[in-house]
Image (cartoon, rainbow, N blue to C red):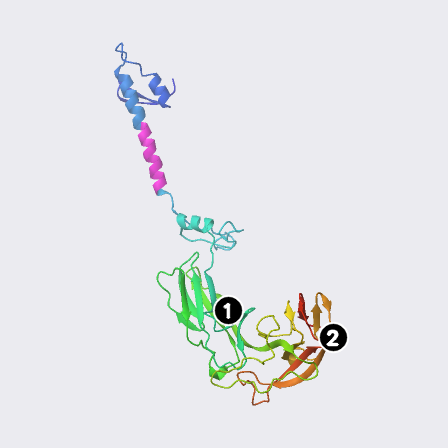
Amino acid sequence: MPIVSTYSVSPILTSREYTTIDELLIQLPDNTNNSIDAIHVRDAVYTLWERLGDVQTIASQSASASVFYTSPIDPVTGNFKPVPQTQGGITSGSTFSGATMQEMWDTFLYPYSPPGRSIAVNGSSWTTLGVSNTKEWGDPDTDVPISWSVTKNSKYITNISVASAVASVTPPGNSQTGTKPSNPAGMSTATINVGGSYQISVSDDGGATNYSATLNVGYMHSVYWGKWPNNTSIPTFSGWAGSAPGYTPIKPSWADGASVGSGKKLATNITGTYDGINGAGQYLVFAWPTFFLPTGMPVFKQDGLTNTAWTKIGSAVPFINRFSFNSAGGGIPYDIWITNTAYNSAVSSFKIELP
């Protein structure tokens, strides 16, 4: 009979503790024949009493256990021993002092993610070209309307700075957006055509590190294309430079696009694709600043093959754009290229590349 212990309050009143509930019940007979004695009742009471004592002991030990974690001390350095390798969100080299179990599990299961951030030109005032938001040289409109957004990830946002100006953080620091409609610092009529970079900086209560995104703005020159009735006279730039108010026309009359686009684009080099270009019985013309290609001949590719039947009909032709840019210096030098023969139909594939 698996009895663990006994307890007596007198020589004749002994109680026995059983190991399991099964053993206790087996020794407790049915009372159909008046078989239950007093000792059977004492055994059941004593066994259950001891089990309640075990539960109290376990609860007491659990309550006295530490709910905080502190890194062990390195006996050599006397400092906290760092975590040897990254585990979940706990990075290698981390140490802890009095961290709660909740903090430990949160750090382990949910790695830190820095705040999201973006900054962009708001509206169509500036043209997006690649990574730059651009206007034509001489454009007097220096306003850079900025829109921005910040996304809360692991921690609440604590600081936001947009274009050198501090933006208010809406408590408690969740995701938010905003605009900066006026001229940011660094852009004014005094710095026209200088351009600049505008940045949003964000920090959260996860640390002192700033996370940023950058908006670049600047100015570009125009490339023009279209058609001309002959290849003996230089397509004219004269008599069309803009003047206030209105700054019209915005391009030479011949720069009609020759069935591709508007005939004008802001660019930093000569390259481009003009599939479907059509001279409609006239000569194709392209014009760009001389410094885009100071020497050599552009690579004109027609249906995948290089076509050298082009002539530079105008070299360093003085050009003043619609904003009268560099009028005091006599204009910007432009080179003008024209086909040697007239084009009567559309070219399915047409590209210009650098040599």
Res. 346 image quadrant: bottom right
What residue span does the magenta drawing correspond to?
50-63
- Residue 71 can be seen, yes or no: no
Q: What's the distance in space between the residues labelled 2 and 1, CA to CA?
A: 44 Å
Q: Which residue is mark 1?
A: 214
Position of residue 157 relative to residue 144, above or below, is: above
Q: Amino acid at mark 2?
A: Ala
Whole-percent x, y for residue 351 in the image: 67, 69
Whole-percent x, y for residue 314 in the image: 68, 83
Q: Amino acid at mark 1?
A: Thr
Position of residue 174 relative to residue 67, above or below, is: below
Where, quadrant-wise, is the N terminus in this rendering? top left
Position of residue 191 relative to residue 109, above or below, is: below
Q: Does the stretch in magenta take in 317?
A: no
Tell whether 186 sits left or right of 1: right
Count residues near mark 1 (Cα–Cα under 10 Å), then give few for <14, some for 14-19, many for 20+.
some
Q: Main secondary structure of the magenta part?
A: helix
Q: Nearer the viewer, residue 214 or 206?
A: 214
- Residue 320 can be seen, yes or no: yes
Res. 331 image quadrant: bottom right
Q: Residue at x 43, y 50 (%)?
A: 106
SS at mark 1?
strand
Position of residue 102 relative to residue 21, above or below, is: below
Q: Residue at x 29, y 27 (%)?
A: 49
Q: Which residue is mark 2?
A: 309
Q: Nearer the viewer, residue 59 or 177?
A: 177
Q: Nearer the viewer, residue 328 or 287?
A: 287
